[in-house]
Image (tube, rainbow, N blue to C red):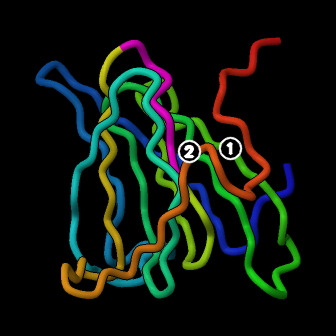
Amino acid sequence: MNTIVDVRLKRLEVIPDERGRLMEMLRADDELFKGFGQIYMTTAYPGAVKAWHYHKKQWDHFVCVRGMVKVVLYDDREGSPTRGEINEFFLGEHQPALLQIPPLVYHGFKCISDYEAMVINCPTEVYNHDDPDEFRVDPHGNDIPYDWSRKDG
């Protein structure tokens, strides 16, 4: 897979002990840190697709803390050396990682676990309800060359 320009994946370490576990996701002294806007949680039920959208200014930082998701990115940026590339990342309990998604890259995710998946996002911008930096495209009827159906093989 040719990784889309400016996309970064940071493997996360889970530190368990007899009381539970701890996992740092993003720190202000992390080389991936670009600024703080807010932190929010979103979930998806089994098989549900939450896609497609992109931002003009905002960087997203996804971590799936419950279940498993398939995050898909599509680079449609003018002049990008990876324009037209699709990337798939599997995040969650079996693969703890932080995925950094740059502005102007289409993204979405699908819950692939048999129970509700929970994703934490730490975007660089505060959500503006009056003028959102969010541009949406239908998950299935669009020009993005991607099929969300399961791929067995």
Left or right for 9, reference 48: right
Q: Residue furthest front?
A: 141
Q: Secondary structure at mark 1?
A: strand
Q: Are marks 1 and 2 in contact (CB under 8 Å)?
A: yes
Residue 76: horizontal and vertical position, in percent? 74, 72
Compared across the picture, whether 107 is left or right of 130 comes to right
In the rendered image, the vertical position of residue 39 relative to residue 117, given as above or below = below
Q: Which residues are magenta?
A: 108-114
Query: Is 53 placed above or below 126 here?
Result: above
Report the number of discs.
2
Query: Image quadrant for the C terminus?
Result: top right
Q: Residues within 10 Å of mark 1 (few under 14, many from 20)?
A: some
Q: Using the image, determine if residue 140 lies above or below residue 27.
A: above
- Queried whether the magenta region covers residue 115, the answer comes back as no
Q: Is residue 109 magenta?
A: yes
Q: Find residue 67 and report its image quarter.
A: top left
Q: Which residue is mark 1?
A: 88
Q: Nearer the viewer, residue 17 or 88?
A: 88
**Residue at horizontal 78 percent and vertical 59 percent from the top:** 3
Q: Residue at x 62, y 48 (%)?
A: 72
Q: Secondary structure at mark 2?
A: strand
Q: Which of marks 2 and 1 precedes in the sequence?
A: 2
- At horizontal 40% and vertical 12% (from top left) the residue drawn is 114
Identify which residue, 49 or 4, lies in the foreground.
Answer: 49
What crowding class fits label 2: few (fewer than 14 Cα within 10 Å), some (14-19), or many (20 or more)?
many
| Amino acid marked by disc 2 | Val
Question: What percent of the width, then of the height, locates residue 1?
Answer: 85, 48
User: Label 1 sits on what residue type?
Assistant: Glu
Q: Viewed as shown, does residue 110 lie left or right of 29? A: right
| Residue ID at (62%, 63%) | 8
Q: Which residue is mark 2?
A: 71
Q: Looking at the rendering, which quadrant does residue 146 occupy?
A: top right
